[in-house]
Image (cartoon, helix red, strand yellow):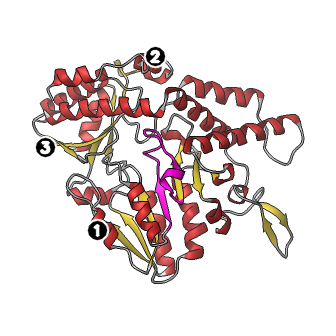
Amino acid sequence: MAQNNVLAALDTSAEFDVNRIRADFPILSIDVGGNPLVYLDNAASSQMPQQVIDRLVHYQTAQHANINRAVHYLSEVATDEYEKARHKIQQFLNAREQREIIFTSGTTDSINLVMHGYGRRFIQAGDEIILTTLEHHSNIVPWQMLAKEKGAVIRVVPINDAGELDIDAYENLFNERTKFVGLIHVSNALGTINPVKQMIDYAHQHNVPVLIDGAQAAPHIPIDVQALDCDFYAFSAHKLCGPTGVGMLYGKASLLEAMQPFKGGGDMIASVTFEKTTYADIPHKFEAGTPPIAAAIGFGAAIDYLCSIGMDQIAAHETKLLHYATERIDAIKGARILGTAAEKTAVISFVLDGVHPHDIGTILSQDGIAVRTGHHCAQPVMQRYNVPATSRASFAFYNDISEVDALIEGIQNVQKIFL
């Protein structure tokens, strides 16, 4: 597609006004070294709109107290707002029940919760756990720890040159010893959208539960956990315009009830004596201690904000940015995009001949352009492509065409310096 045709396809409709949306994000108006900020590191962490900032300030100035148990006014208000946030996440994911939503410190914490709560109870010596080459380290290392402890075996689904999973190889990994599947929904390193519904259905034919790492999917595409029929789903608030330090785990109620707690302490109990502790019902069984109350409420506000725009509209705008940026980078001599899956979110991981990714990131930053460089906590992906690192531009719904153009100009400036 010629550049002019791509630009024509990117005309925004009245329903999606990117300039109006950008006005909601105060940080997008800052300068970096005299240049306007071009923030293209959204896969690492997105920015926060004023509406979420205001909600956090309102909570801290008018509603803050510790939650549960107390009968005074502020505690009751804070408890109610915290549980409202849980309900918003339930609706966002279309979970069947509110008690299937557990607040955690983030996706990594959620995966570790499942590893300890489910894996340590039900995985035995000789059992097999299926992961994929595309996994973030947070969905590799916990299962390696479990496998070492239990004497279990990890099997890995390979990818093709485009960064797509080999589904035939996935299905061939199943046998009577297969007991668990951990699967990333969207690759943080390549942007590949995996066919998780197909993979979940196949696992369930073998009575194998599936955990989905949705950290890179939830901010960009609509998620329906009932339609997916996944057993667990995890993501973090800070990747979808919310605060850091809070995330969530969805789990089917029957599985959560069968799991052992990950952490012990206050508020996750029904009764305690020195002889015996009785645990609270889900979700509280998995929320020991004082939770991230303010962050959870901010999480709910971020979901309100995204839903006010519409996840379908967000996905459509980001896809248009992806197509345009792909066309522009492909046209640069010496640039190569890693990950060319047919189904992608707006992540472009690229290398430049003769230039180290860290040098690319440093020079782009001098022009105010923020990209991520390194292995992206996905070293098996880098090993698959035989590169030590890449530069990664990841787009959000508040990015626009001019920022893609700034990136292209920045890459060309890098080449002028090094080549």
Q: Which circle's residue, 1 or 2, is located before the other in the chain?
A: 2
Give me the C-alpha separation between circle 3 and circle 2: 38 Å
Examine the rendered structure and indicate whether residue 278 appears above or below residue 235: below
SS label for mark 2: helix
- Residue mark closest to the camera, 3 vs 1: 1
Type of amino acid under label 2: Arg
- Residue mark closest to the camera, 1 vs 2: 1
**Residue 353 shows which numbered tag?**
3
Query: Which residue lies at the image location 44% right of the left edge and 18% below the top edge?
Result: 29
- Using residue 378 as the reference point, say whether residue 22 is left or right of it: right
Based on the picture, tell me whether residue 327 belongs to the magenta stretch: no
Based on the picture, tell me whether residue 221 belongs to the magenta stretch: yes
SS label for mark 1: helix
Residues 301 and 254: in front is 254
Type of amino acid under label 3: Asp
Dots 3, 1 in contact, CB < 8 A: no
| Residue under label 2 | 20
Query: Which residue lies at the image location 52% right of the left edge and 31% below the top edge?
Result: 306
Give me the C-alpha separation between circle 3 and circle 1: 32 Å
**Residue 244 position within the rendered picture, expressed as x and y whole percent measured from the top left:** 55, 41
Residue range highlighted in magenta: 209-231
Residues 39 and 126: in front is 126
Type of amino acid under label 1: Ala
| Residue under label 1 | 169
Examine the rendered structure and indicate whether residue 141 appears above or below residue 7: below
Answer with the quarter of the image where residue 415 lies. Answer: top left
Query: Which residue lies at the image location 48% right of the left edge and 53% below the top edge?
Result: 228
Q: Which circle's residue, 3 or 1, is located before the other in the chain?
A: 1
